Image (tube, rainbow, N blue to C red):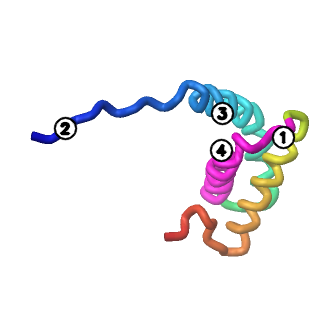
């Protein structure tokens, strides 16, 4: 008979951090879409850039400490992702 262990839950601190990050990210979403639209032409590319920005930024969020520069940092991440898309480079997150 196999030993079945219950799944461990995600620590509350990580969940709280992600919820705070998501709230901060979505408060900037209109700006992110606007800026991505200035760099890219197609709506699919704009959505992909914002999504890639969320993935990249959420992975770095625990290391990000400067509250005042969050929006500027997020815009830099978005512009990097949008430029990768614009010049036909597969974003590193989507490479196999």
Q: Residue furthest left?
A: 1
Determine the image quadrant of residue 61: top right
Crowd tier of the residue under label 2, counting other residues whose Cα lies within 10 Å: few below 14, some 14–19, many 20 or above: few
Residue behind mark 2: 3
**In 3D space, how far apart are the residues under numbered discs 3 and 2 (Cα atoms)?**
37 Å
- Disc ID at residue 71: 1
Q: Nearer the viewer, residue 8 or 96?
A: 8
Q: Nearer the viewer, residue 95 or 7?
A: 7
Which type of secondary structure does the marked residue at label 3 adopt?
helix
Front-lying residue, 13 or 18: 13
Residue bearing the label numbered 4 = 58
Residue at image location 83% in from the left, 47% down from the top: 73
How many residues crowd mark 4 within 10 Å: few (<14), some (14–19), many (20+)? Answer: some
The number of callouts visible is: 4
Residue 43 seen from this side: no
Disc with the residue nearer the chain's start (3 vs 1): 3
Residue 96: image x %, image y %? 49, 70
Q: Is residue 90 visible?
A: yes
User: What's the residue at 52%, 29% (across, down)?
Assistant: 11
Above or below residue 82? Residue 9 is above
- Alpha carbon distance from label 3 to label 1: 13 Å
Work out how far the residue at label 4 is from the one at label 3, CA to CA, in angstroms.
Answer: 8 Å
Tell which tag, 4 or 3, sits nearer the viewer. Answer: 4
Q: Earlier in the sequence, mark 2 or mark 1?
A: 2
Instruction: Please state the extent of the stretch shown in magenta in the rendering.
Output: 43-66
What separation in Å lies between label 4 and label 2 (alpha carbons)?
Answer: 35 Å
């Amino acid at each position: 008979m196999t030993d079945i262990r219950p799944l461990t839950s995600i620590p509350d601190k990580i969940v709280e951090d992600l919820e705070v990050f998501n709230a901060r990210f979505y408060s900037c979403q209109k700006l992110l879409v606007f800026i991505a639209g200035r760099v890219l032409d197609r709506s699919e590319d704009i959505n992909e850039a914002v999504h890639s920005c969320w993935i990249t930024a959420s992975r770095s969020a625990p290391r990000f400490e400067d509250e005042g520069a969050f929006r500027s940092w997020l815009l830099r991440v978005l512009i990097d992702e949008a430029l990768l898309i614009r010049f036909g480079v597969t974003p590193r997150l989507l490479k196999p």
